[in-house]
Amino acid sequence: MDAAIKAVELRKTFVTREGGVLFRGRRKIVEALKDVSFEVRKGEIFGLLGPNGAGKTTTIKILSTLLLPDSGEAWVGGFHVVREAPRVREVIGVSLYSDRGFYWKLTGRENLLYFARLHHLDERYARRKIDQLLELLDLSEDADRLVEEYSTGMKSKLNIARALLHDPPILFLDEPTIGLDPNSARKVREVILELKREGKTILLTTHNMFEADALCDRVAIISRGRIIAVGTPNDLKSKMAQHKVVEVTLVGFEDGLLSKLREVPGVVGVATRIRDPVAGVAEVKVVYSDSLREILSPLFTADVKVLSIRNLEPSLEDVFVALTGERLEES
Amino acid sequence: MRKARRALQTLAAVVVKEMKITSRYIGFLVMMASLPFMFSGMMMGIGYAIAGPSAPRNFASNTGVEDPLLYTVLGGVLMIGCMVLIENTSGIIREEQMMGTFELHYLTPNSTILLWLFHSLSSALITLGVMAVNVIAVLALRTSLPSPVDWLIAAGITLLGLLPLAGLGLVVAALTVRFKEVWAVASSVNAFVAMLSGFYYPLEVFPIAVRLASQFLPTSHAAQLLRSLFTGTASSLNLWERLAVMFALGLAYLAVGRAFYLRWEYAAKKRGELSKY
């Protein structure tokens, strides 16, 4: 098998409970994955791009053998994730959380050493490897501090170091830069690119389009448990060649305005981000393929005050807006 | 051979980690070491309140032991050890889930049941250390120190008495992880075990049905054996007979714990509960 990772029609449904006081609440069925299929080639960085709740972490957990799919199949490093789970675990490194996954009363180095021992690494090799990884991730100076004193950025980097302890050829990184300051995020991105240069295959999830654009060889856009599109960032953006993007900042936004805009012929996608809920300031992004005047006509007839109109270069987020009518990040 | 070496490596990793963490919670160690004395003081106080000056005489005639402090400290150390072990094993899924370390163990090439049992073994070893300190203190004050062979036998009895409880802990852990009531269930189990193990009194005070039920607890055998080792009291079964019973109970407890845990583990992987807390 040429693909390092292959997922075929993965489905996963969760049953959750809502409310309930003394007894458990009402049953609610959530379809987390609906026939998700994709392939990741050896040595590439593949991004799963989508908003929170899109199914990214569920996909990673199935591929890393932590979750059983309801149906569908997947292979990692040529091994089946259900039938050959122990073999899969030998070839993967997984970073699942940004700031959890450590014993607070152990130092960073002691945490890594514990997991290195659980991977049965030779003691001297493990210590050397840990020094190397701490150096790579700029954590050498803080290696002997208790993890309870670490910042989110340091914990996130330590998570990546742990995933690399046994030198796996395939890496799963779940939102590796979420909640990080710009410097830490940049460092993590540099490390990811360095790992790619070493020949590792990396599957990362993100809802940060800049990150997907900057790091990924190919990206799968995932929304509400479905893969909507797969391609290189440029391929995906070229789908926008016939489309234009405008962002309107306005005061007095109401939900009804979105449906009015969506009904205008030529509008491909509309999404909004509330900037100031008290003042009612919102940014409305419209992906369209017709004349701007027609597109914006509902704005001029509505009871809103337009503060600015900006034409934008199409980005991955606009592809996302065009395909799903959602924005990737809420803020 | 390779499997055994790897298991030992995993055991060493867990024990070193647990010892390090415990050594950084000094308050916990102080509590473990002091609670048996506090409980002993409480029991002796109650005895004096009920029987007045004849309390020591009554105690000696009912238990066959002249020294109530040694008797109750031995029982107290076992009781605290038993409580710590059941709570640790019962709460291990929840605690590790909350820290985010639970799933990470599933990504290592180890049996997860073995991993959690090694965590319980670490708890038992810490209890052994505390027991040694406490019992040495009392024996040094009252009589003379036992021989190294006696210490080794005491260590074996304590481990054999405590480790099977890990099976009980796994059952509680597996049953309660969905209902998020681990501490309530673990504390109830602890109270039940403490009452039936005779840590502070001879089990002969109970009716026959309760005494029979207590024979199914490895801790009641451990308590009797430790007492007969350090205080010379007579026991209805000899050392090897009791050890054989404890060993059989240990296997049964661990088998039940394993069965429950594996069932929960499969369901958790289906429902996505490995990381839910």
Image (cartoon, coloured by chain):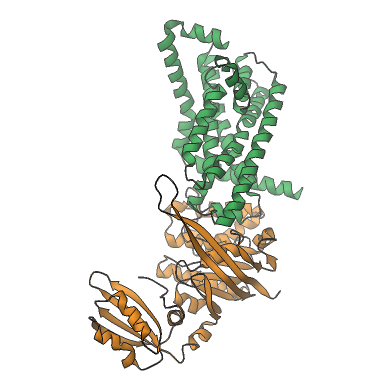
Asked whether B191 or B199 is in front, the reply is B191
Is residue A103 something one can see in this rendering? no
Q: Which residues are magenta?
A: A325-329
**Image height of B66 relative to A96, above or below:** above
Taking the view exactly as shown, the residue that stands out farthest to the front is A26
Q: Residue A168, image x and y in percent?
A: 64, 65
Is B234 positioned to the left or the right of A257 in the image?
A: right
The residue nearer to you, when weighing B220 against B69, is B220
Judging by colour alone, the chain drawn in orange in this rendered image is A
Looking at the image, which residue sits at the far bottom? A291
Whether A294 is drawn above or below B213: the answer is below
Task: Identify the residue shown where x is 56% and y is 44%.
Answer: B174
Residue A238 x/y as whole percent: 49, 88
Task: Give the residue at x 57% y 16%.
Answer: B207
The green-coloured chain is labelled B
Whether the magenta-drawn stretch holds residue B15 is answered as no
Question: Residue B217: in sight, yes or no?
Answer: yes
Instruction: Report the residue at 62% width, 25% height from top.
Output: B222
> Looking at the image, is B20 positioned above or below residue A311?
above
Relative to A309, does residue B277 appear above or below in the rendering?
A: above
